[in-house]
Image (tube, rainbow, N blue to C red):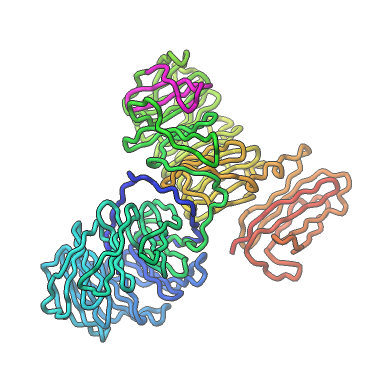
Amino acid sequence: MKKATVLIFTLLILFSNTEAVYHKIGHYPAEYISVDGELIGDNLYLLELDIMSILDVSNPENPELISTTTMYSQAQDIVVQDDIAYIGGGGRIDIFDVSNPENPIHLSMIPVTYWCVSLSVKNDMLYAACGQGGLYFVDVSNPQSPIIEAHYEEFWRSILIDVVWPAAYVQYFECGLHIFNIEDINNITQVGELPSYTDYFIINEEQLYINAEQNFINIFDISNPLEPVQLSSLEGVGRPLSVEENILYTRGTGIDVFQINDDFELSPLGMYDSWSNIEGFMVSDRIAFDVTTWEGMQIIDLSDPLEEKCIGSCELPIIPDDMDHFENAVYFGFDYNEMAGIVDVSDLEDPIYLPFPNAEEQLESFTLWNDVLFAKDWFNIYSYDLSNPLEPELLNTFESIPGGDILLTMEDILIDFDYSEIKFYSIVSPFEISEISGYSDIGLKTAEEAKDGFVYYAISQQGIKIINLTDPENPELVEFYSIDGFVGGMKINDNILYVSAESGVILLDITNPASIMFITSIQPHEDSEFTAPVIIDGNDLIIADASWNELFIYDISNPTVPVLVNNYRGCRRIIKMILVDDYLLTGNSRSGFAVMSLDGLLESEENEINPCGSYLYNYPNPFNPTTTISFNFTAENAKDTELVIYNIKGQKIKQFSIFNNQSSIVWDGTDENNQLVSSGIYFYKLDAGEFSQTRKMILLK
């Protein structure tokens, strides 16, 4: 049984504060729209519209393609049984022999009306739900010569089917789950109907799991398939995806994992946060293969929940649109007509969410000016005194651009971004702002920064624009840097602009803002995605990969060659983040607000620049199969200089002697016996007289 249609689940729910967070371990890209999949042993059958790819997933972190086969129509659903693959598509069902995965053989075709969107195969009988084409019952005892035994055109809204003899469970589009007696397939009769909110239901042994109204999960005993008996019901669980042993996996805004107790009540175990629409979900030994619409397949380890760095968390109403911090308060603005809020972080282990006091309209954006908070709703800008950060006191209200939703300050200038224009105000005092000038520019503004009289802002799907505001009365566009896709955040450090984009973190040299230059980009994974502005702490660059729910720490003592020094997969899908001491305060896409301790992750002391200009780094990092270790040192006694590579246990792997004027060596991932070492973390130490330094590198295969 597979799901057959895509339903966009609203984000306007109260996100759960789940303790355990599971992590992504792999990815398989899709060239086209992914629609479904089937896992049989170590072989995974992935449908991408008119292509079936067969993958070897015996190593889940690195799926290997076995073969691709072109379909005869755009596929919608697949069932594989006894080395036979049944694939439903537009106007037909195709049958393939996949006993040799390297060379699938087309056996036959079953013509159907409209689209075959869901299949079930039981005891040599294939049952097909074909939407407006109705229901089909096909004898497939001989896959080379299938025979249509019955066709019921009147059931034209069927989108999902599964069979537990003698009952067929058929989900209707935007209707309930219908139960039919199919003992006589030439005269099937409806015997019952259960409320079902979406096209998601699953059957596991003698239990039926249905997503009902108001996002309930209802569980039924179907030991008598024609007369289901309800066992339990739980609100806010999401849509059922799979059951493995006593674990239920569901889809809300991500994947939620529940323990099925003896009485069939559900206890939450954890979650994996993901934006992607799930088109297929397969799980084996707690490793999930999550087929998503546009991104291909995510591979998630659901056996070992991680979040040991999270020391405190609380719920937020919805996904944060803006986040600012002042002393013991974190201010959140939201979209979707949700009122603003404050998180009290007086106790980082017990943050408390509070509504923003005395706000009559929806505040979406904040910016700080000294100890004053400026806030923006649809029509106005407000100034608040922060003498008590948890109870901001309204000082004044100013009319502004209707619809503007981003505020920014630069010295004594307040900047208001709207879809069609930008307004610049002089901040005379918290009680008075005066308009200086404006700049017309149509486009969705998504990120902003300002420094030394220049304003940097991103327009979605276009790129970054730079305005010279050294003469505030005459703003002038001086540069445009094209970037495809969405830019979620920007941060300036020294003369470098760090841009958090969909595909990676881009470093731009803005020494001359009128002529910005590309330096490099950081993309830890092929499908990495960045939304939160980066954080820079000394020589540590902290970036949050929203696709992998992972933090990366890079050494940027040499910004042209960022060096990965640490990573952590136990975080949530971070939308906004702020560093306070060694604690990361995060606003997340579905899991509210969290406080992470970065103890052991930051390496600012190790990364301090040597005043004599000495350095040590390797590139690329991570690497496969080789990396270049570069160095420069000043030492009076460097005649016995050596570089030694150690494994994570501290055992010596390989040693290099460094000769005069030598500035780099290449390590090919072998030990002293020229045997390839395994993937993992390694350390390299350079000793040159008084200069001694150790760095970390990661070998990925």
Q: Residue at x 30, y 58 (%)?
A: 233
Question: How far across and down, in percent of the image, does residue 323 sit?
Answer: 46, 35
Which quadrant holds residue 626? bottom right
Residue 482 position by quadrant: top left
Q: Residue furthest front?
A: 263
Q: Residue at x 38, y 60 (%)?
A: 266
Q: In which quadrant of the rendered image does the C terminus lie?
A: bottom right
Q: Which residues are magenta?
A: 368-397
697 within the magenta span? no
Q: Is residue 63 above or below residue 417?
A: below
Residue 372: within the magenta?
A: yes
Q: Is residue 127 left or right of residue 280?
A: left
Task: Return the x and y of residue 571 as percentages of the image width and height.
Answer: 52, 50
Q: Dividing the image into 4 quarters, which one contains the N terminus?
A: bottom left
Residue 279 left/right relative to 675: left
For the image, the number of numbered tags is 0
Q: Give the camera-side residue of 79 and 615.
A: 79
Name the quadrant containing residue 629. bottom right
Q: What predominant SS class does the magenta segment belong to?
A: strand
Outermost residue on the bottom side: it is 142
